[in-house]
Image (cartoon, rainbow, N blue to C red):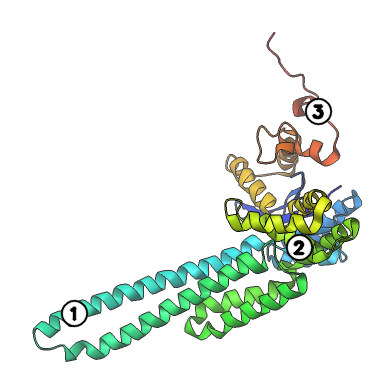
């Protein structure tokens, strides 16, 4: 069964191709060329999938309006989580822009300082003093803004949107605080900070939806092993620490002392919970990158070609993977748990084998 699905859109010759895949197995259940990517189109395709038995607990996608509206119409009871990757990319692009702008202000101040020095040697330093003072003020402001936004971005990445972090309610408060701090600096660069602020405000609940499920899983582990939920969360934070630092092992020793003989079992359960957290639609982005290589070979796509391509991708075994359980298995095998013949044999062909 598909627990969490990932949805996205890819374009070929200006036409959208709707894509959907299972996060756990990478099984592609939707690959459809459409004239539009509006809510009605997404809704119809999702209803068709529902009739075929697809009922995920949740989905994850970017901020596409048609995609989200279509799911709300077709699957009103299924939440569509926000993709953390896209949010961090938006904030990261803002940080890089502000850092580059600060570097430009530093270069402008340095250039004006050299002009000032040359003028002083001629006894005309006063002609550049006001200009230099203004540029220095702009430089200091640009550097301070870049540093502040970079710090806010680190808090967002490492504390609010990280797997290891506080509970959902605290994350929401921290998220609102960071957005408020960013909005307070919006007048200093409105054309770049403003869109990011609006994006984060609109996506808050979707981006933090994973944290609400994580709280439930932590509570379940705590109840199963009869330990405090705070200890379970501390183990989650422990796993996020660098194993090469003494502080990490000191904290682990403390946790072992608190949990005693239950440490290993609780630790294994927490590790499994952390591995199952889905914050980003990386699977669908990876699938899209693979699809582009096939789309590049064809100027025009059709339903038959896309269905054959989907069949091939779902039944071709992974030759390698970062996850050991995927190596040598196809997405269809990972999804169903049942082996199947080679994909060519599934199509009715006989494989040629050298004697």
Is mark 2 in CB contact (under 8 Å) with mark 1?
A: no
Circle 3 Cα neighbour tier, 10 Å, few/some/many (<14 / 14–19 / ≥20): few
> Which quadrant of the view contains residue 153?
bottom right
Residue 90, placed above or below residue 186: above
Q: Residue 61, position in %: x, y?
A: 71, 60
Secondary structure of residue under mark 2: helix
* Of pointers 2 and 3, the one earlier in the residue sequence: 2
Q: How many marks?
A: 3
Q: Which residue is mark 3?
A: 346
In terms of depth relative to the viewer, which is nearer, 87 or 249? 249
Residue at label 2? Answer: 233
- Distance from disc 2 to disc 3, alpha carbons, whole Å, reads 47 Å
Q: Quadrant of residue 158?
A: bottom right
Q: Which residue is mark 1?
A: 115
Q: Position of residue 250 (x, y in %)?
A: 65, 57
Q: Determine the secondary structure under disc 3.
A: helix
Q: Quadrant of the C terminus?
A: top right
Picture coordinates of residue 85, whole percent (x, y):
63, 60
The local secondary structure at tag 1 comes to: helix
């Amino acid at each position: 069964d598909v627990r969490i699905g990932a949805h996205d859109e890819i374009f070929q010759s200006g036409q959208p191709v709707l894509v959907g895949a299972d996060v756990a197995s990478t099984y592609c259940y939707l690959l459809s060329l459409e004239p539009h990517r509006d809510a009605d189109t997404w809704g119809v395709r999702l209803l068709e999938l529902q009739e075929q038995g697809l009922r995920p607990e949740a989905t994850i996608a970017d901020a596409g309006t048609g995609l989200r509206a279509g799911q709300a119409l077709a699957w009103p009871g299924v939440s569509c989580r926000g993709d953390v990757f896209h949010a961090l990319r938006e904030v990261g692009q803002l940080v890089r822009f502000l850092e580059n702008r600060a570097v430009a202000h530093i270069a402008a101040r340095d250039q004006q300082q050299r002009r000032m020095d040359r003028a002083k040697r001629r006894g005309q330093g006063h002609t550049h003093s006001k200009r230099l003072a203004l540029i220095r003020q702009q430089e200091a402001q640009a550097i301070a803004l870049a540093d502040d936004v970079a710090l806010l971005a680190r808090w967002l990445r490492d504390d609010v949107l990280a797997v290891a972090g506080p509970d959902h309610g605290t994350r929401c408060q921290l998220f609102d605080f960071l957005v408020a701090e960013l909005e307070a600096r919006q007048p200093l660069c409105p054309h770049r900070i403003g869109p990011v602020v609006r994006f984060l405000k609109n996506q808050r609940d979707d981006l933090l939806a994973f944290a609400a499920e994580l709280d439930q899983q932590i509570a379940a582990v705590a109840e199963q092993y009869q330990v405090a939920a705070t200890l379970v969360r501390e183990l989650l934070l422990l796993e996020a620490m660098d194993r090469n630092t003494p502080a990490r092992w000191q904290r682990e020793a403390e946790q072992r002392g608190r949990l005693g003989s239950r440490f290993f079992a609780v630790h294994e359960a927490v590790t499994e919970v952390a591995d199952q957290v889905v914050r980003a639609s990386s699977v669908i982005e990876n699938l899209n990158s693979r699809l582009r290589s096939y789309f590049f070979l064809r100027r025009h796509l059709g339903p038959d070609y896309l269905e054959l391509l989907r069949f091939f991708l779902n039944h071709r075994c992974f030759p390698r993977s970062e996850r050991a359980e995927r190596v040598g298995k196809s997405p269809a095998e990972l999804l169903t748990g049942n082996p199947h013949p080679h994909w060519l044999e599934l199509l009715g062909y006989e494989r040629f084998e050298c004697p």
